[in-house]
Amino acid sequence: MNGYALRALRIAAVAICAGLMACNTLPSSFAAGLVPGPPLRMSVTSADWEAYKAAFLWPDGRIVDTANDNISHSEGQGYGMLLAAAADDQAAFERIWAFTRTELLVRDDGLAAWVWRPEASPHVTDVNNATDGDLLIAYALYLASERWNNPIYREAARRISTAIADLLIVDIDGGAYLLPGATGFRKPEEPDTIVINPSYWVFPALRMLQRLGSAERFDKTMTTGLEVLGKARFGDRKLPADWLQVSPSGIAPDPARTPVFGYDGLRIPLYLMLAGYNQPALLQPFYDDWVQRDRGTPMIVDLNTGATRETPDDPGYRILAALVACATAGTPIPEGLKSFSPTMYYPSTLHLLGLSLARGGYPQC
């Protein structure tokens, strides 16, 4: 990228920042005092897990994204392994892990290729990774090693978490930021300017994987992620854009993309609560927008205009708002959200994770 293009990106970032009335600089003390509660033990009922397996786990060990041409990706494999461990189904866990190990862990650095396409030959056409998928896979392996006393799973988790710490965390202006992937999110000519996605901070994984090494590195990354969430509150709705640019001038929506709080961002409060972070300072923007504004439904928001683009009605999305309402105001989860019936891969996955969170951390709701 030439100098004129770089200057244009900087100008665009400043314009977007000004338009959204938020040009946030770092560092900050927002994360000070945000101490997580005890780790939550995940638990998925046999009936719910069997329904999920029937809908999304294919015989070859793939978790299939039914809304996206039946592809499989590292995120889905990680979610599937996590849910299998929570359901105490080692046979299913091993089947998902075997596919992941042989079909996605094809890079030479310990990270997983992000997507497997059934119609393509070869099936992996893009070997770039997706950091949230790597975190979920390593997290699931660690939990499985603890549940079933399996040192092989633990060592595999350690190898992946070490690669994440070494290759995907970058230091900028005192913070430790998580790159969304190994390539494509920073420019060699501007080493202090990167693109991040706040929903890729899988906080429970970052917290638990510290037990395998790189503890200081992961802890600093968690602190930086909390700081990002404190800063990235844009427009009238005060929500984070899915894609952000971090530069010496601060944090702003990525100028190469329309600033949207989208489907990625819906899982941010879920990850916070799974890691034991339920402080109002973190959850209030989601409570204000999802509960106070729309009475219990997360929304996809154009942060430039403040307009709602979509109001997803799947119970897997609505339970996220219910969990925020429970943690923030003690509101019981509606009875209709406490039962699970598969719909599409992504909301169904969020639904099971949400139910597990409710059982493990908020039984009163």
Image: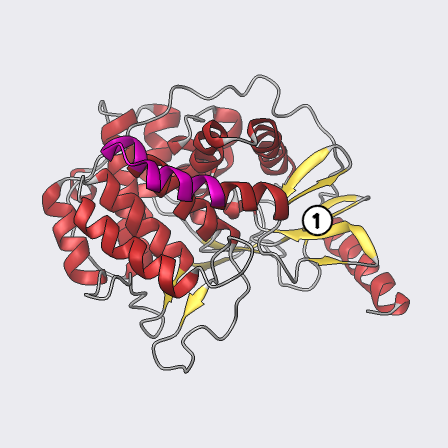
Crowding at dot 1, Cα within 10 Å, few <14 / some 14-19 / many 20+, comes out as many
Which stretch appears magenta?
A: 145-159
**Residue 246 picture location, percent across and down:** 72, 47
Taking the image as shown, residue 1 lies to the left or right of residue 128, namely right
Q: Amino acid at mark 1?
A: Ala
- The mark tally for this picture is 1
Q: Please indicate, yes or no, whether residue 260 appears anywhere in the rendered image.
A: yes
- Residue 226: name its quadrant: top right
- The majority secondary structure of the magenta stretch comes to helix
Q: Residue at x 50, y 41 (%)?
A: 161
**Residue 112 picture location, percent across and down:** 47, 58
Taking the image as shown, residue 345 lies to the left or right of residue 1, namely left
Quadrant (top left/top right/bottom left/bottom right) for the N terminus: bottom right
**Residue 27 picture location, percent across and down:** 74, 31
The image shows residue 253, relative to residue 114, as above or below, that is above
SS at badge 1? strand
The image shows residue 286, relative to residue 362, as above or below, that is below
Quadrant (top left/top right/bottom left/bottom right) for the C terminus: top left
Q: Is residue 319 magenta?
A: no
Q: Is residue 155 magenta?
A: yes
Q: Which residue is mark 1?
A: 252
**Residue 240 picture location, percent across and down:** 57, 46
Taking the image as shown, residue 152 lies to the left or right of residue 3, namely left
